[in-house]
């Protein structure tokens, strides 16, 4: 942490503050005039600057103006005598963190400096995060479209709306848009509007004046001020309260805003990038999102694909996350076996890239051995697929003969190819099947039908399932319906009705 700079021509004031801050474990550096501070700023900056207003030569107000031009996020506390309160207010409006009236209570002065210190450290963390933009990985065609869009937007300041499921990397793309924009040297500030309580969100966005509400002991800059000249990323914009949407619209419209409790308009030179996993059009229709704000945000829309739409990227991402996790822990990176990699590539992973990253972190810490097999993966992941060992990544069923129904519709006699029994083991098309792999094949068929927009998927697959069970049971009982019903655990009347409904023919009467 950098030292706190104290600027005052009164040596006794400097000495008192130095000793008080030293007792708090805080380092200091003192100056007797503005010229010394200006020279020192050529070689470094403080964590907090505490300056008197009236000094021989250049004043503290001139120093404040100079510092705010070069280092807008640096908290400056001005000290002034009671007779200079007008000057203090002017300094306060000019960007000072707070003013300290002389003579001051030493404990209160230290408390104020600590608050400014916390603000400065928080801003430093934000700046650090904005400079550590992770790489976006992906070779799938859908991701190449995203990369091309980022390239096209590289020299633009236009507002962008990023949509996509949770965990697809919306903030990562927003950071990339900032990094490759003309604003790259300025701050990137991110705010998840769904993670902040409604009564605090306004203050987070726009800041507040001292005394604006209970607990507002000092003026605080909001995210719009922190992002000045740079980019403000508003995640989960669809969850923003309706009344705050109005204030946001006003900023996007005329570029001005007010702090909570403030009366002076502040100009915002900020590029806004918003993101949501929700259907904003539907929320507009439901009256939950302002239509005019929607059109303000929806200038350029960038849709991120889910991991299901880019399964070919899963091996690349998994290896990257395993290597990254190993570096953080200082251990050797683990490797997924071909079978385990195929297993992961077949999963839907509703949490998308974030879920895959968390899974790789789990593997690095918990999986035994350097080569990870399917059985070494989290139990809940294996159980969710209904299998403990899957050799092929995903098997597509062959076209199979339909059952003739009482109408024009046809359904296959089975959702799986007819197996051949070789040495007591089930085979289909020469590929060994695990007993439970049919569940994954059912999931694949359901996914295909849902993706293609087929209607009544549950009914269609249910009929296929029932037909397959009844046909198989009837084969085992050589067409005897009563025996087949007993084997299936259903009544004779039920199987008779099902046979008629499904149009199963060529049976022997009991």
Image (cartoon, rainbow, N blue to C red):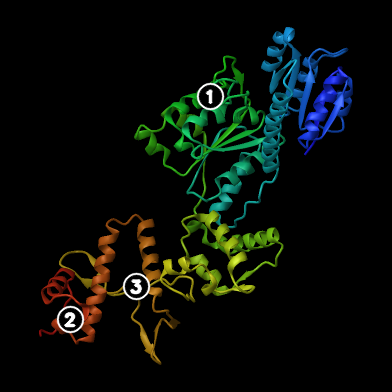
Foreground residue among 59 and 385? 59
Occupied quadrant, residue 419: bottom left
Q: Earlier in the sequence, mark 1 or mark 3?
A: 1
**Circle 1 SS class:** loop
- For residue 54, above or below residue 299: above
Occupied quadrant, residue 155: top right
- For residue 488, above or below residue 288: below
- In the drawing, does residue 220 fall left or right of residue 307? right
Residue 190: image location, x then y, percent: 59, 38
Q: CA distance from mark 3 to mark 2?
A: 30 Å
Residue 469: image location, x then y, percent: 25, 76
Q: CA distance from mark 1 to mark 2?
A: 74 Å
Foreground residue among 264 and 113? 113
Q: Comparing marks 3 and 2, which lies closer to the viewer?
A: 2
Q: CA distance from mark 1 to mark 3?
A: 70 Å
Which residue is tagged 1? 214
Q: Which mark is residue 399?
A: 3
Query: Can I make out residue 180 in this image?
Result: no
Q: Earlier in the sequence, mark 1 or mark 2?
A: 1
Q: Earlier in the sequence, mark 3 or mark 2?
A: 3
Quadrant where the N terminus is found in the figure: top right
Quadrant where the C terminus is found in the figure: bottom left
Query: Can I make out residue 430 in this image?
Result: yes
Foreground residue among 466 and 233? 233
Which residue is tagged 2? 486
Residue at the image point whose x is 63% and y is 27% from the top: 225
């Amino acid at each position: 942490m950098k030292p706190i700079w104290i600027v005052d021509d009164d040596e006794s004031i400097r000495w008192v503050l130095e000793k008080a801050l030293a007792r708090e474990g805080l380092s200091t550096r003192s100056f007797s005039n503005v010229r010394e501070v200006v020279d020192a700023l050529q070689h470094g900056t403080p964590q907090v600057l505490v300056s008197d207003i009236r000094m021989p030569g250049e004043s503290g107000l001139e120093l404040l103006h100079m510092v705010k031009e070069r280092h807008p996020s640096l908290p400056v506390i001005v000290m002034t005598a009671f007779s200079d309160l007008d000057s203090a207010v002017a300094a306060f409006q000019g960007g000072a963190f707070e003013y300290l009236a002389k003579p001051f209570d030493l404990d209160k002065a230290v408390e104020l400096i600590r608050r400014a210190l916390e603000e400065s450290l928080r801003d430093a963390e934000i700046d650090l995060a904005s400079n550590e933009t992770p790489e976006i990985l992906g070779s799938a065609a859908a991701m190449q479209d995203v990369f091309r869009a980022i390239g096209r937007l590289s020299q633009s300041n236009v507002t962008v709306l990023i949509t996509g499921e949770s965990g697809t990397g919306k903030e990562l793309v927003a950071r990339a848009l900032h990094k490759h924009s003309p604003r790259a040297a300025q701050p990137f500030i991110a705010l998840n509007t769904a993670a902040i309580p409604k009564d605090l969100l306004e203050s987070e966005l726009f800041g507040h004046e001292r005394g604006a509400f209970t607990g507002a002991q000092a003026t605080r800059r909001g995210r719009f001020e922190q992002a000045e000249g740079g980019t403000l990323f508003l995640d989960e914009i669809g969850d923003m309260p309706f009344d705050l949407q109005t204030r946001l619209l006003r900023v996007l419209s005329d570029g001005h805003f007010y702090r909570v409790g403030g009366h002076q308009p502040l100009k915002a030179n900020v590029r806004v990038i918003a993101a949501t996993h929700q259907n904003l059009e539907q929320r507009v229709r439901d009256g939950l999102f302002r239509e005019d704000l929607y059109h303000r945000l929806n200038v350029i829309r960038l849709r991120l694909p889910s991991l299901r739409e880019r399964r070919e990227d899963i091996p690349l991402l998994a290896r990257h996350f395993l290597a990254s996790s190993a570096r953080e822990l200082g251990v050797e990176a683990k490797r997924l076996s071909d079978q385990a990699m195929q297993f992961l590539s077949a999963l839907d992973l509703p949490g998308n890239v974030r879920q895959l990253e968390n899974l790789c972190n789990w593997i690095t810490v918990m999986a035994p051995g350097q080569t990870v097999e399917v059985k070494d993966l989290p139990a809940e992941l294996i159980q969710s697929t209904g299998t403990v060992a899957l050799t092929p990544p995903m098997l597509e069923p062959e076209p199979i003969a339909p059952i003739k129904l009482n109408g024009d519709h046809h359904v296959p006699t089975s959702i799986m190819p007819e197996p051949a029994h070789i040495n007591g083991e089930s085979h289909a098309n020469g590929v060994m099947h695990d007993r439970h792999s049919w569940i994954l094949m059912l999931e694949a068929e359901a996914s295909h039908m849902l993706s293609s927009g087929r209607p009544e998927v549950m009914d269609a697959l249910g009929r296929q399932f029932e037909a397959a069970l009844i046909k198989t049971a009837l084969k085992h009982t050589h067409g005897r319906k009563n025996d087949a019903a007993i084997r299936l655990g259903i009544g004779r009347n039920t199987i008779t009705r099902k046979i008629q409904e499904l149009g199963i023919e060529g049976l022997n009467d009991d």
